[in-house]
Image (spheres, rainbow, N blue to C red):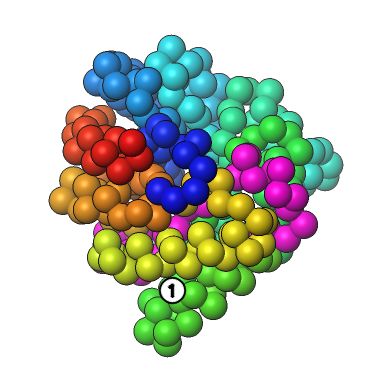
Amino acid sequence: MEGDNIMKKLLIGTNTKMYKGIAHTISFLEELGELTNDIRHSIELFVIPSFTTLDQAVRVAGKYNIRIGAQNVAWENEGPFTGEVSPVMLSEVGVDIAEIAHSERRQIFGETDSMANSKVQASICNNLTALLCIGETKQEKDGRIADAVLKKQIEEGLNGIKPEDAANIWIAYEPVWAIGEKGEPATSQYAEDRHAYIRQTLESLLGHNIIPILYGGSVNHMNAAKLIREPHIDGLFVGRSAWDAHNFNRIIRDVLPIWQEKTK
Ligand code: PGA
């Protein structure tokens, strides 16, 4: 990784989407915590489970130093917003990451860059780490406008963010065409090129490059090591391949030595 070397720990996590109720989330966290016990000091591990599990998940994850995130957040602290969960409420439960504008939120629920921006601002104000997800669709990739799309998502998503707020922001680059069962993982070179572009865009916007940029989209044990070797990929955001604790542990152990070599 270029620039300041403050991201020494391997940043890796999973969003369990609308899978795993309370019992499964707790057993997953316990298993993952035990399996990664010996490398805990070298990894920044995070899990983003369903809302209904958060209270209990935070308690269990605390024992293992696993950070817990929410899959969405409202942009107001309180008010007449039926069905929304405010950043204050998330903080109260002990959540410390808010995932914002995952491609499923954008594609299925119509979230816009301006909504993402309000959510980033609200998260930062409440001391949550804002994990802003960006990524182009297949059509945009084929139309060769991926970088323009990413630039817009960054500039609008982080509009009004002060350089000093960057310490509370992570970016996940997740090309829409790479996500899910029908997804095709990006090649490490394609991902690296986008990450380099994202880094450059963040630098011109904020004047520095301390925001970690994670890659997500069909990460698995076959491609994880290759991806993390790339200079501008600072971490991995894993879906399906992480939902079994043993598989996830395997991926973490595959990439950790490569990460350590890269950042030493
Ligand atoms: P996937 O999901 O790894 O199952 O493709 C990634 C994501 O949606 O974050």
Q: Which residues are magenta?
A: 157-185
Residue 85 is situated, as x and y percent measured from the top left of the image, at 67, 39
Residue 154 is situated, as x and y percent measured from the top left of the image, at 60, 63
Residue 17 is situated, as x and y percent measured from the top left of the image, at 43, 45
57 left or right, relative to 129: left
- Identified by mark 1, the residue type is Thr
Q: Name the residue tied to disc 1.
A: 137
Q: Residue at x 37, y 20 (%)?
A: 41
Task: Classify 148 as above or below 235.
Answer: below
Q: Residue at x 83, y 42 (%)?
A: 79
Residue 202 is situated, as x and y percent measured from the top left of the image, at 59, 59
116 left or right, relative to 122: left
Residue 264: which quarter of the image? top left
22 left or right, relative to 100: left
* Of residues 181 and 33, the one drawn nearer to the viewer in this rendering: 33
Q: Residue at x 48, y 82 (%)?
A: 145
Task: Classify 207 as above or below 27.
Answer: below
Q: Residue furthest bottom?
A: 143
Asked if the stretch drawn in magenta spans residue 176, the answer is: yes
